[in-house]
Amino acid sequence: MSLYITSLNSGSNGNCYYVGNNEEAVLVDAGISCRETERRLRRLGLGMDKVKAIFVSHEHSDHIKGIPVLARRYRLPVYITDPAHQYCGFRLEQEQVRSFQPHEPVQVGSLTITAFPKFHDASDPYSFVIACNDVKVGVFTDIGHPCQHVINYFRQCHAAFLEANYDEDMLENGRYPYYLKQRIRGEKGHLSNRQALELFTRHRPSFMSHLLLSHLSKENNDPQLVQNLFTTHANGTEIVVASRFKETAVFHINAKASAVKRPAVTVSQLQLSFA
């Protein structure tokens, strides 16, 4: 069975990612309003009737501000850790709150969702991989640096939402105060274009069909710059820049995509890589 994915919004003004099949779907984060979530799903020919749960990556407002109304209106379970729930600024009804543990799969219908910890300046941050049969889609945003967890799960994905938050030169020369620049590029901040590209080029599996570049900074990045940078290294993967103003198209992800051919690696190259 295949998966359908879309970014409903991606950026510091709100993040919401949809992953599902023909029967059910989940939202990873809900940082735009209930009304706007409904409106964007309708435009895509989707609907909230298939959404069976919300998974929360962390408690920052651009990831959670739509949750109270969405969860109440559609009686949705919300998978959130205790620390994130404590600091999120609202309280959900107890029967709607579900916990999860790192690396332990959660079943939502025929979807399997696996959470794993990451580095970010939040109380208890997680990223997620959503699977259906052999197809896997990862949501990798709000990451200070690509730790081994991120690398291991990224290598498994047929498609991924991957943070490319800032261009290093734009951040350095921009108007942000020094402390904020340090926070963004710190170990618990966000991935730069360079870090994201390195993760993609070094660890992308041959079967990855789509990469949705996500959580771009409005001030410190440029969508066309990122599109050009990654397209140059795409090697068969479709590159999409997720917007901070509107939904992307719906992408159909399956496990039947032909493998992307990679250049042969010589013995000398291998020796250099382990030097």
Image (spheres, rainbow, N blue to C red):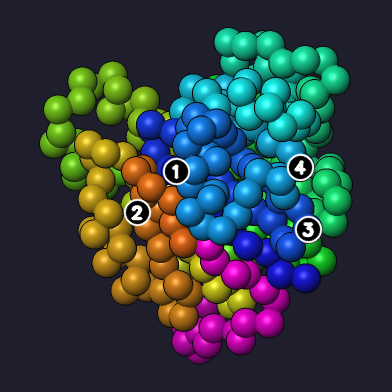
x, y percent for residue 26: 69, 46
Q: Earlier in the sequence, mark 2 or mark 4?
A: 4
Left or right side of 98 for 142: left
Q: Which residues are magenta?
A: 250-275
x, y percent for residue 139: 58, 49
Residue identifier under label 1: 9
x, y percent for residue 141: 51, 43
Residue identifier under label 2: 194
Q: Give the secondary structure at mark 3.
A: loop
Q: CA gap, disc 2 to disc 3?
A: 38 Å
Q: Earlier in the sequence, mark 1 or mark 4?
A: 1
Seen in the picture, residue 214 relative to 197 is either above or below; the reply is: above
Residue identifier under label 3: 23
For badge 1, the amino acid type reads Asn
Residue identifier under label 4: 52
Q: Nearer the viewer, mark 2 or mark 3?
A: 3
